[in-house]
Image (spheres, rainbow, N blue to C red):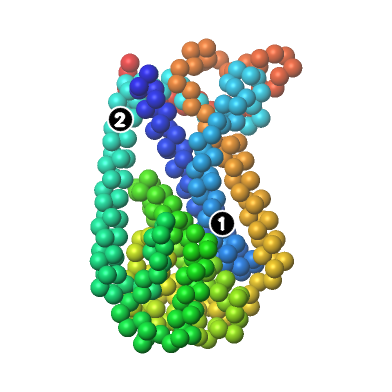
């Protein structure tokens, strides 16, 4: 029983990882067109598809809902025949989980050290400007903040960070880090984390500029100054980006005309449709996992439950027997 549960847990984690990777590839392809057509806020909203796909992969699949012997399966299914009974899969789940959790713990320890280092720098006035904290958010500013930034620029910094707080971006950053910890071995997740943080800053820039279009020049000067000071926390919403390319993106965005309300509304509607489509695709394409299908003949194809039922057009049986029983 314990081996069966471990096997199901490992398979569920692997299915979630596949769903996450597929959603990341989709978002990476769509974010630039979405930014041009509907604005940076819609492009940033696309990243919600990644945790949504992961959550959808944990729900019962299409084959689970209709049942293996129901005689109706409009798609195809992948069946793991008696996988938990194989010698390899009696030992593998515990080894995989141990490796998985060890890597996650090590990655979490590295992040904790990085966050502690950032907090130490913040106390010395060598970090920021940035918003830190999840439950109790506050603005961190570097030494010389009052003299380096003009009154107008300080007001723009406050507006930008208020935008982060109103959108609960620190909480989103915590979710991004949680996915990085769980998927520490997946390079797509780490690439997506950087891209999502860039889109987050672009969305806040767009919101601030929409409120005051006349502040573009001062806002660009503030971005350039913030690039030269402070450090960045893995959890903070910081002005200073990680490289030259994100800064160029943010400055280029300031030169564009803000998207109209109609375009943003259409983009939001398209985002909602993309979310429903992601859930539907995961549900339709996710493979079924069967541990002990004693009633299934390994040599004969599955038969319909009755004459009026329609047999599934494709049934892919995968044998996970890696060593003789």
Q: Are marks 2 and 1 in contact (CB under 8 Å)?
A: no
Nearest the eye: 320 or 185: 185
Badge 2 marks a residue whose secondary structure is helix
Give the residue at x 38% y 78%. 227
Q: Is residue 151 above or below residue 200?
A: below
Callout 1: SS: helix
Instruction: Residue 109 in the image: state x and y as whole percent.
Output: 26, 51
> Residue, x 60% and y 62% (percent of image)?
42
Q: Position of residue 140 (x, y in %)?
A: 36, 71
Image position of 263 with respect to 216: above or below: above
Q: Determine which residue is flagged by label 1.
A: 46
Residue drawn at 49 percent across, 52 percent down: 24
Q: Earlier in the sequence, mark 2 or mark 1?
A: 1
User: Quadrant of residue 39 in the image?
Assistant: bottom right
Q: Residue furthest front?
A: 136
Q: CA distance from mark 2 to mark 1?
A: 35 Å
Task: Give the residue number, with chain letter if any, for mark 2.
Answer: 94
Circle count? 2
Q: Based on the displayed image, in which of its 4 quarters is residue 138 positioned? A: bottom left
Q: Position of residue 172 (x, y in %)?
A: 46, 56
- Out of 97 and 82, give the one closest to the viewer: 97
Q: Badge 2, how many Cα within 10 Å: few under 14, some, many 20+?
A: some
- Residue pictured at 30% horizontal, 56% vertical: 111
């Amino acid at each position: 029983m314990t081996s069966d549960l471990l096997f199901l847990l490992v398979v569920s984690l692997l299915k979630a990882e596949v769903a996450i990777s597929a959603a990341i590839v989709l978002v990476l392809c769509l974010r630039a067109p979405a930014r041009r057509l509907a604005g940076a806020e819609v492009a940033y909203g696309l990243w919600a598809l990644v945790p949504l796909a992961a959550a959808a992969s944990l729900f019962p699949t299409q084959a689970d809902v209709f049942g293996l012997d129901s005689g109706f399966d409009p798609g195809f299914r992948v069946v793991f025949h008696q996988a938990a009974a194989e010698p390899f899969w009696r030992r593998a789940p515990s080894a995989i989980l141990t490796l998985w959790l060890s890597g996650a713990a090590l990655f979490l320890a590295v992040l904790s050290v990085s966050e502690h280092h950032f907090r130490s720098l913040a106390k010395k006035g060598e970090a920021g400007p940035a918003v830190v904290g999840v439950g109790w958010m506050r603005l961190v500013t570097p030494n010389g903040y009052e003299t380096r930034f003009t009154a107008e620029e300080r007001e723009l910094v406050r507006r930008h960070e208020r935008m982060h707080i109103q959108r609960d971006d620190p909480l989103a950053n915590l979710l991004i880090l949680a996915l990085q910890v769980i998927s520490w071995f997946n390079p797509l997740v780490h690439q997506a984390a950087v891209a999502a943080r860039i889109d987050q800053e672009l969305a806040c820039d767009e919101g601030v500029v929409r409120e005051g279009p006349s502040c573009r020049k001062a806002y660009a000067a503030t971005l350039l100054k913030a690039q030269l000071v402070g450090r960045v926390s893995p959890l903070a919403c910081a002005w200073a980006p990680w490289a030259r390319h994100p800064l160029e993106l943010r400055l280029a965005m300031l030169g564009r005309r803000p998207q109209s309300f109609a375009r943003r509304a259409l983009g939001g509607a398209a985002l909602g449709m993309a979310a429903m489509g992601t859930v539907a695709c995961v549900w339709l394409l996710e493979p079924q996992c069967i541990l002990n299908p004693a009633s299934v003949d390994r040599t004969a194809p599955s038969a319909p439950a009755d004459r009026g039922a329609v047999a599934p057009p494709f049934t892919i049986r995968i044998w996970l027997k890696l060593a003789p029983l």
